[in-house]
Amino acid sequence: MKKIAIIGGGAAGFFTAANLGKELGKQTVIFEQSPAPLQKVRVSGGGRCNVTHACFDPRELVEFYPRGKKELLSVFHQFQPGDTMEWFESRNVPLKVEEDNRIFPVSDNSMSIIEALMKEVEKNQVEIRLSENVLKIEKKENHFLVHTKSEVLPFEKVIFTPGSSVKSMDILRNLRHKIVKPVPSLFTFNIKDERLKDLMGISFEWSEIAIPQFKLEAEGPLLITHWGLSGPGILRLSAWGALELNKANYEFSIRINFIQQDKEYCIDFLNELKLEHAKKLVQNINPFSFPKRFWHRLLEVCKIPVDLTFSHLNKQQIQALATELTEGIYQVKGKSTFKDEFVTAGGVDLKEVDFKTMESKVCPNLFLAGEILNIDAITGGFNFQACWSEGHIIAKHLESIN
């Protein structure tokens, strides 16, 4: 009987295996249902892999997690982004911190991360079984039985890191775990609105976005897509509002401020332009450096003719333009999955996990990490950091008791 089964060949599973050491590693088997491991690592950050985030104070770091904040504080005190950077860089994967504090390999290629993990796992002599679907886990008195399609294998301990599939949740329910219903956490907003029609690809460096109904606010870059709106600002809102937006069946209103100034400031600014550019056509002066197509669309929405000069802008038109720029209301009807960073809220109830070791409180010798837990974060490398930290804790605990 081998000692350890790792169910799931993603970030948490492989990082655990990479830190087990050779003595435990050669008694460990990773079961991964797909034909290739580390698929989310491969596509993260557009194929560059956003490894972690340059936030090195655990108290500040946990503020990026809508769910799991309290529990992760002790986890990050044990292993935080600085430790992640040191781990990869000591294995010949130099990393870089970008302007927004996201951390990537210098190579800008996720394969650098994957190859480092694979090399450590192979060095530890861990057996990797790809295309191996685990159907069931049975708890016996002093061991587990792991059922695959072809055989039933005994293990002393199970590390469960399969992601958040319905099947994975069912396996844990059979081991007496309580599951918080999973819902999407990172997604974009579907909006059919004439103001956005045919403007796909236009982006804004910084916008303020709110969902007044749920008192949610976020800011960040914004992108118009063929289905509506995306970008970091939208994704942050989707993460913090994951549960409420799911209950609302993804139908709600958002308010957008495209210029980061209030309406009164905008009105005063437009009146100044009226004096300064009195004889010029409004459509030819783009005061906010928007792409021309967007500026012209706003003028059209506010019924400002193409041949109108600033001197002829009336009070109602200025009011309408200021409203669109600072308080534009858009109706969201549905969502689209943000495929590269697909994350869910929900999973194992956090009260059932000992976060000093990541061991289950209801099923001894079962360890849990990654998206199977009711923990999630906004984009920026935070979800991977939780996986690295939890996996490292499990590996070091098992080494200490071996």
Image (cartoon, grey):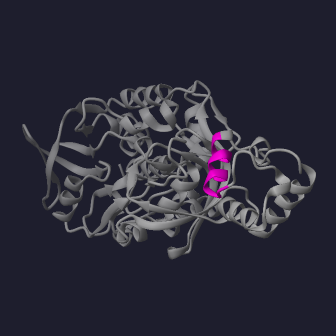
Q: Is residue 214 magenta?
A: no
Q: Is residue 369 visible?
A: no
- Image quarter where the N terminus lies is top left
Q: Along the line of sight, which residue is nearer the eye, 260 or 243? A: 260
Query: What x and y, as percent, mark residue 47?
Result: 48, 31
Q: Is residue 283 above or below residue 347?
A: above
Q: Is residue 301 magenta?
A: yes
Q: Position of residue 333 (x, y in %)?
A: 40, 60
The one nearer the camera, 108 or 112, is 108
**Residue located at (32% from left, 62% from top):** 182
Q: Is 346 in front, or is 249?
A: 249
Q: Is residue 252 left or right of residue 273?
A: left
Report the residue at 57% width, 50% height from top: 232
Between 1 and 90, the residue placed more toward the observer is 90
24 left or right of 259? Answer: left
Res 266 → quadrant:
bottom right
| Residue 273 relative to residue 299: left or right | right
Q: Residue at x 22, y 55 (%)?
A: 166
Q: Look at the magenta stretch and give its main secondary structure.
A: helix
Label total for image = 0
Residue located 33% across and 36% down the image: 25
Q: Is residue 359 visible?
A: yes
Q: Which residues are magenta?
A: 293-303
Residue 192: image location, x then y, percent: 44, 54
